Image (tube, grey):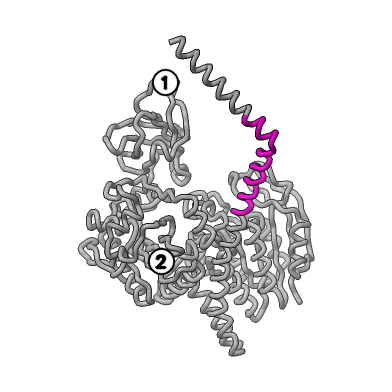
Amino acid sequence: MSEAPGATVDRDGVTVGIERPGVIDVLFDGQWTWSFQSERDTAPAWRGQHAARRAPWPVNLRPYLHGTGQVTVRERSSGRVLFDGEYAFDDSDARVRIVDGQGRPLIVDKGGDLQCGFAERGQATVDALLDAVEDVLARLNGAGVDAFLAFGALLGAVRDGRFIPHDSDADVAYLSRHTSPVDVARESFALERVMIEAGYWTWRFSAADFKVIVPDPEGGRAIDVFAGFVVEDVFYLMPEVASTSFRPEIVLPLGEVELHGRRITAPANAEALLEITYGPHWRVPDPSFKFESPRWVRRRLDGWLRGNNGNRAHWWSFYFGRPQEAVPTEPSPFARWVRDREPADASIVDIGAGTGRDSLWFARQGHDVLGLDYIPAATERAGNTAAAQDLPARFKTVNLYDIRQVLAIGGELAHRDTPPTLYGRFLIHALEDEGRHNLWRVASMSLRRGGRFYLEFRTGLDAGKEHEFGEHFRKYLEPETVIAEIEARGGQVEHCEAGHGLAVHKNEDPHVCRLVATWKR
Amino acid sequence: MQAGRDMETLKTRARARTRELVKQLARATGVDQELRRLVDRVDQLEREVQETRRLHQRLAELTDVVAEVLVPAADRDDARLRATLEKYSKTSF
């Protein structure tokens, strides 16, 4: 079949021909926004009668595609323009603008998140990040590991002596001396404590890598801290890299590279580590680069170190991006129902607080509130609102899949002078089995001296129905199943009702269960 | 041109016939059942391996709590334990 030249843009994505596979750049208003590989990132499609490939718009870009935009699609290697023109994504009069709150262009990074690249950032931000990179590396090395610049930051330093323009954070890694994943994980926990005690805010991605957030004049950048380790002669570098040809001399003794005029700690043979990381073509810039780890690598790293990520990808995008704006700001009917049943001075712990709509409302009614959620964007935003309005609510990032966090929060709540009121709205059905079982553990620890756990969740009768927030992981449990689980773990259910009309949102009236449980011994 | 197309058709038919014969032979000898059993077994083994791998993370988490919280708890000082727990929550995640 013959091939149509050019590309087509529509509401679903960008469709290109199949004749010359390669990297395709997509620009809005002449500003580079996103790149994809015309074979890897696409599905078969048709342009008229011609076989083609369509790359769907990245999920996090979609909320910006309203109104009409000036779109350019071009081949990266040749610069050949495949499409250049106005496209109306819908009927609104708006112009498509892919910018952040300060009007700076956003780009789609390799994780699919929208970021403001270094090219758009001021020197003060770059300086703040470099200061922090030096500080983090010094603290890691001071804690006894061999830490060095890695990934995109190392790549930019070796290629141009600068951060890569479309990159948005800095990465460091260290070579662990441990050879068992359990010890690698414990070491990473200890290193995170070093960073928190140094005053940094952190967030853990797996048991062997975490983010250090660096405050800067533009709101904060991240330094990712990745473990590198050898198990059974295979070198693994979190989050995706593995090599059977690694030798410790590639990293040790540590050397230096130049980054924006500063000498930064680097692997002994930076080029060799970059080849292990990005393959033999690492010198050629490719903003569409994605790690494609073999199945055996992914399975090992998932199994050893990434067991706590239950559905995080969905909620991460939801709370970091615009979808969270669709969550109502007024309290849920369930929150009002609970407030009517609890004393005015009840201290409320909202587990899975999300945007904090109910937590903040409870606080406005005078309750002392602790809001917990495993997505930092959610807890940070709600915490900022509470601080700005001087409300008695604080928010903390807690992951119910992590035993450490479950035991720590359960222990902390158990030691309170007065037992808390636990509150979990639309939480149960968002958890995988392990998270739900850990939730019962938190409840049994916290409520052993009294207090109630209020739960509202979708039942099996809601499965298969249309949902205002679309389809994603939901575990529909029947009330009797939840009651049996609670009772099996020492709890007692003092109230249970289920039906429609309890949690109406726009056109959706889900079948939900309201349940009140206690764990008093 | 026509002869080429006829040859392609013959080849396609021959390949389909061969596939069918192999299937019949597999059924007759029980090999297909054995293959299905092995595929299921590999699937089960992969799940079992992954379940075992997950213990690394759980063990790391539990030993972290034991070392940081339960060992200091041996002092039986409730105020200290409360402070230890608070510090653990504050500095560990």
Q: Nearer the viewer, residue A75 or A387?
A: A75
Q: Chain of mark 1?
A: A
Amino acid of disc 1: Met
Q: Residue placed at 31% from the left, 63% from the top?
A: A250
Q: Magenta part of the protein: which range?
A: B22-46
Q: Quarter-wise, where is residue A357 in the image?
A: bottom right
User: Could you tell me which secondary element the residue under label 1 belongs to?
Assistant: loop
Vertical order, A86 against A464 (above or below): above
Label number found at residue A34 = none
Q: Residue placed at 68% from the left, 69% from the top?
A: A443
Please state if A155 lies on the left or on the right of B31 as rendered: left
Q: Write down the residue under mark 1.
A: A1
Amino acid of disc 2: Val
Helix, strand or loop: magenta stretch: helix
Please state if A315 lies on the left or on the right of A413 as rendered: left
User: Could you tell me which secondary element the residue under label 2 belongs to?
Assistant: strand
Badges 1 and 2: C-beta atoms under 8 Å apart? no
Please state if A408 lies on the left or on the right of A217 as rendered: right
Q: Tell me where residue A159 appears, x and y as whole percent.
A: 24, 54
Q: Chain of mark 2?
A: A
Q: Write down the residue under mark 2.
A: A212
